[in-house]
Amino acid sequence: MRRAGPAACGLALALAAGAARAQSGDEWLGADKALHFTASALISGSGYALGAWGFEATAPRVLLGAGLGLAAGVGKELVDLAGYGDPSWRDLAWDALGVGVGVTAAWLVDRALRPTARPPRPAWMLVPSIARAGATLTLAW
């Protein structure tokens, strides 16, 4: 009986999506969706790269890239809502997908190009050694 809830939600979403498509004429795979995806991916990836100049940590870089990409997408839809275009939730969904791909791609490139940090080697250390005569500790530097 617990599985009936998710199935009912899925059916309701499928029916709602079909009704929305019939009303608006805005297709999920329309030509403008590729533009939304690509622009958002490029803006968010560039934002991550810009953050790499200013931040050592990864989290601020990701937040800057995602923030710029989402701001551009939401800003475009607000301009459309003001009467300069056709606002669409589907465009915003493709913007969000592009932001995710752009930030992830920039992070992967960053990981591949950034040198790995090695822990600093101590100036000296004790090296244990075992011989027939017994165990000793040797100071090495």
Image (spheres, rainbow, N blue to C red):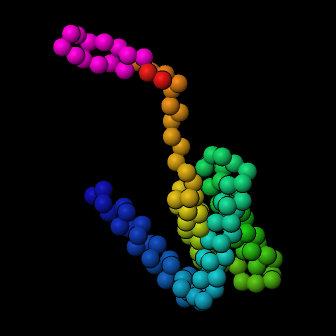
Report the side of 59 relative to 125 (left or right). right
Question: Looking at the image, can residue 7 be seen?
Answer: yes
Q: Quadrant of residue 114?
A: bottom right
Specify whether residue 46 is painted magenta.
Answer: no
Query: Does the rendering let one see residue 24?
Result: no
Quadrant of the image for the N terminus? bottom left
Residue 2 at x, y = what percent? 30, 56
The x, y position of residue 30, in whole percent, is 58, 88
138 to the left or right of 62: left
The foreground one among 10 and 33 is: 33
Segment tinted magenta in the rendering: 127-139
The residue lying furthest to the left in this view is 132
Front-lying residue, 61 or 92: 61
The overriding secondary structure of the stretch rendered in magenta is strand
Residue under the point 22% across and 10% down:
134
Residue in the picture at 31% in, 12% down? 136
x and y percent of residue 67 in the render?
69, 59
Q: Residue at x 55, y 62 (%)?
A: 109
Task: In the rendered view, tell whether residue 132 sits above or below residue 48.
Answer: above
Compared to 136, does 50 lie above or below? below
Q: Nearer the viewer, residue 2 or 111?
A: 111
Write the residue at 63% across / 86% down: 32
**Residue 133 figure quarter:** top left
